[in-house]
Image: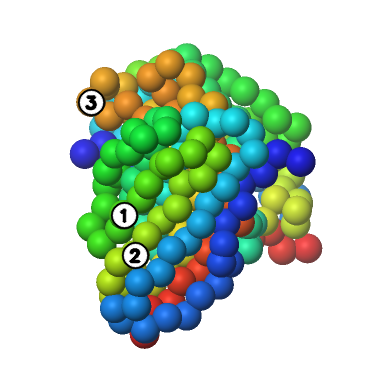
Amino acid sequence: EAQVTQNPRYLITVTGKKLTVTCSQNMNHEYMSWYRQDPGLGLRQIYYSMNVEVTDKGDVPEGYKVSRKEKRNFPLILESPSPNQTSLYFCASSFRQGENTGELFFGEGSRLTVL
Amino acid sequence: TQLLEQSPQFLSIQEGENLTVYCNSSSVFSSLQWYRQEPGEGPVLLVTVVTGGEVKKLKRLTFQFGDARKDSSLHITAAQPGDTGLYLCAGEPGNMDSSYKLIFGSGTRLLVRP
């Protein structure tokens, strides 16, 4: 079954404790992206990757890191989480079409709470 | 920065009623997507519109892309409780500097009461 898998689905942590949210897709998609979803703000892009070893900042990259060492995996790293990073996070992938992102396939989301 | 504004933010209607959701911008988009998101899940693509003036139908849902490719609408006929969810529009920017940066609207939360 074609899917994007995120882990963990739920996490409560404390300020400053490094954490990683993993994302894996089995569709051989070149493009992967991380979004955060906050009430009234829709989905905001954190980082994206067009292919292995190619990553770029989205609209809200501060406080986050990513890496793309393999095509299927795109982990999101919070080196020193702060309460303003409490949010619902989504990983997504697509078979990008030319200059366009194309249809995004989303994971089920990871709800993060930073105390 | 290109923005997409959706309206209304919330909509609560009775089963059988019609509704329209709007997605507006002052910027041109090369294409526009509509997603639906249900609680506890990620958004799922409903449709992509590409050509100015394009109309696409998906059962009781009708999607339209504005002639100038700056706005879009989603019309639902005879809404059903199964249509309940968060509807998101997302635009592909029309300029090379913003490639691969799909821009999402803030969403319209729809509740269809039985």
- Viewer-nearest residue: A21 or A34: A21
* Residues behind callouts 2 and 1 on a single chain: yes
Q: Is residue A45 left or right of residue B74?
A: left
On the rendered image, what quadrant is the N terminus of chain B found in? top left
Which amino acid, mark 3?
Asp
User: For residue A78, which numbered disc appears in the image?
Assistant: 2
* Residues behind callouts 3 and 1 on a single chain: no
Which amino acid, mark 2?
Leu
**Image x and y of residue A35, in percent:** 42, 51
Whether the residues at callouts 2 and 1 have beta carbons within 8 Å, the answer is yes
Q: Quick one: label 2, few (<14), some, or many (20+) residues within 10 Å? A: some
Say which residue label 1 marks: A65
Q: Rounded to the nearest whole Å, what is the CA distance between mark 3 and mark 1?
A: 22 Å
Q: Is residue A115 left or right of residue B74?
A: left
Assign a secondary structure to mark 1: strand
Asked if one can make out residue B69 in the rendered structure from this viewpoint, the answer is no
Whether the residues at callouts 2 and 3 have beta carbons within 8 Å, the answer is no
Q: Is residue A108 left or right of residue B89?
A: right
Residue at (30, 66) in percent of width and height = A79
Q: Chain of mark 3?
A: B
